[in-house]
Image: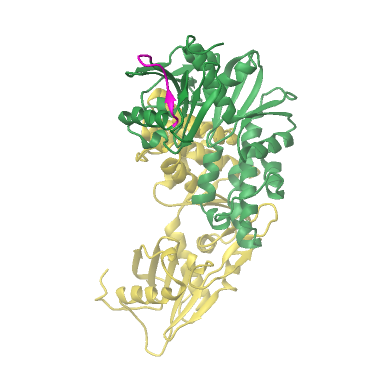
Chain colours: A yellow, B green
Amino acid sequence: LSGAEICACAGAVADWGTSNLRIWLLDGDGRVLARAASADGADRIDPDGFEAVLRAKLVALGASWPAETKLPVVICGMAGARNGWRETGYVAVPAAPTDCLRPVVGIEAVDLDIRIMPGLSKPDAQNPDVMRGEETQLLGFTAAEPDFSGLLCMPGTHSKWVRFAQGRIVNFHTAITGELFALLSGQSVLRHVIGHASGFTADHPAFESGLAVTLVQPERLMLDLFPVRAAGLLGGQTGAAAAARLSGLLIGAEIALSLAGALPAAPVVLVAAGKLAPLYARALTRAGRDVRLFDAEELVLDGLRTAARLLFPRSFKE
Amino acid sequence: LSGAEICACAGAVADWGTSNLRIWLLDGDGRVLARAASADGADRIDPDGFEAVLRAKLVALGASWPAETKLPVVICGMAGARNGWRETGYVAVPAAPTDCLRPVVGIEAVDLDIRIMPGLSKPDAQNPDVMRGEETQLLGFTAAEPDFSGLLCMPGTHSKWVRFAQGRIVNFHTAITGELFALLSGQSVLRHVIGHASGFTADHPAFESGLAVTLVQPERLMLDLFPVRAAGLLGGQTGAAAAARLSGLLIGAEIALSLAGALPAAPVVLVAAGKLAPLYARALTRAGRDVRLFDAEELVLDGLRTAARLLFPRSFKE
């Protein structure tokens, strides 16, 4: 993506996560004119440094807009966290995804009109929870399915499970499944057997065998971790099989616990990208669920585009 | 402990763990003449380097024994692991702790007669397990209670739960509770709320509240981890409270799962040292169990002394 080409754009939108920044230039119809992805995550930038990074990205993408006007910019993700650019709060559930558009935080620059999305919170005394960034994917999802009722699963480092009723988010919870996999495979005693082998696919027998345990008895997870190591010592289990087993145990437990109380036969909306999509699709199928797969990256863009249209109605057409 | 004083000893025993080395000089009655502890763990020593480290410790402790005789030395722990001094195998359960004395590996040096203890294994296809080092504590325990039947808990980085029937080990399993606590509090998203605060006691309300959840519903552990972080973001929970809550959740789940199938009213033998002893004693009490506490460090020494007596009957009195 060269900066040589000039893009006359109606606005820019960005998903500014902990580790990565993705930015898109949009025309007045919401179509993507240019895009960029980089490792300029919010964790690496001081609060004073965000505007310069944003500006550099816009220049690199060749963004241009009429003189003496301000370019609309919508940002979601960790740019709005406590140590991000400007702290945005949380909208408490139950809430519709569009409710996140009201407490958006604005930052006025000379030639930019920036809005940062808030997160969602569940201020439950026993099980409080938060999300930041995913609310924008949910906004993208409900733009397509405004009256959705059911369960939506967003796997990742911190998987989010969201329950909808007629387009409103009524509950959600987080399972730190991806983080547990990374810590256990890379830093616990299991690293001796898993090593650097994490390449396995959803049809690996050890992934299936792990699922078979915890989909039925999710509590078994805690006592089934060390046996992955012991199997390597006693039986010469391969690293890939150990990684697959660990992944199956973790994802199986997450799914069994998250489906508890859900309507038995209802399909699950799976919002995923990359290698997690086939793993979770397989696991949900093993749990007896039909899966409707949505691409996580497309939903972020859809959500940011929806936010841009609603926040800047004069710049974007419906 | 100065090397200036000369100890005429009958033998030496050592617990050579991953991170630490503890060594004792014994007289012919098994009494401790001198002791030393250091960070010369097996992880830091090449296979060729163990003898020199051992010899240096003996000199520093002032060990002396008759010329032209070999000093008996008994070692347990990771010195017998694959990357230790000399790999010793595993004795499969069911087994009596004294069964570990037969496959001891001998190393003959000019003036030392060294024996390294094997570990214990459970060669179960679904849930294989191993221990190395703890078998010697079990030998010490059964020296005092040769006909014990019941459940024994050894909390730690990798907690071991051991079921005895009339002095024989019939089953055991491992929960990596201590390792999970260290990884989650120090390296996961929970580090932001726990920070360096890990100082809490067994009567902390958040420890009790964590126990109350997972002692009854151990499967809740996985979904109750992220709320510890969210409580910090939404409610300003302190780091000590978060550490206590995490500890209670983990220990409660470990205990609930490990007591499943155990005789309902039987007391549990708790083999612990340091700050884990009061935490596990409190948690076991909350689970409705009477606790008999044994000091973990004393049991290692008792076990090594028992092994020395049985392996070197001419050097030690019964």
Residue A269 visible = yes
Does residue B306 sit above or below A97 in this rendering? above
- The percent position of residue B146, horizontal first and vertical second, equals 63, 14
Q: Is residue A288 left or right of residue A56?
A: right
Specify the principal SS of the magenta part. loop
Q: Which residues are magenta?
A: B61-69
Does residue A198 sit above or below B107 in this rendering? below
Towards the viewer: B99 or B265: B99
Towards the viewer: A219 or A140: A219
Q: Is residue B169 magenta?
A: no
- The percent position of residue A20, horizontal first and vertical second, equals 40, 62
Circle count: 0
Toward the bottom, the furthest residue is A68
User: Which residue sits at x=72%, y=25%?
Assistant: B267
- The quarter holding residue B110 reads top left
Residue A168 visible = no
Toward the top, the furthest residue is B314
Q: Is residue B63 magenta?
A: yes
- The percent position of residue A93, horizontal first and vertical second, equals 65, 61
- The percent position of residue A164, horizontal first and vertical second, equals 61, 55
- The quarter holding residue A165 reads bottom right
Towards the viewer: A132 or A312: A132
Does residue A195 sit above or below B82 in this rendering? below
- The quarter holding residue B282 reads top right
User: Which residue sits at x=56%, y=11%?
Assistant: B318
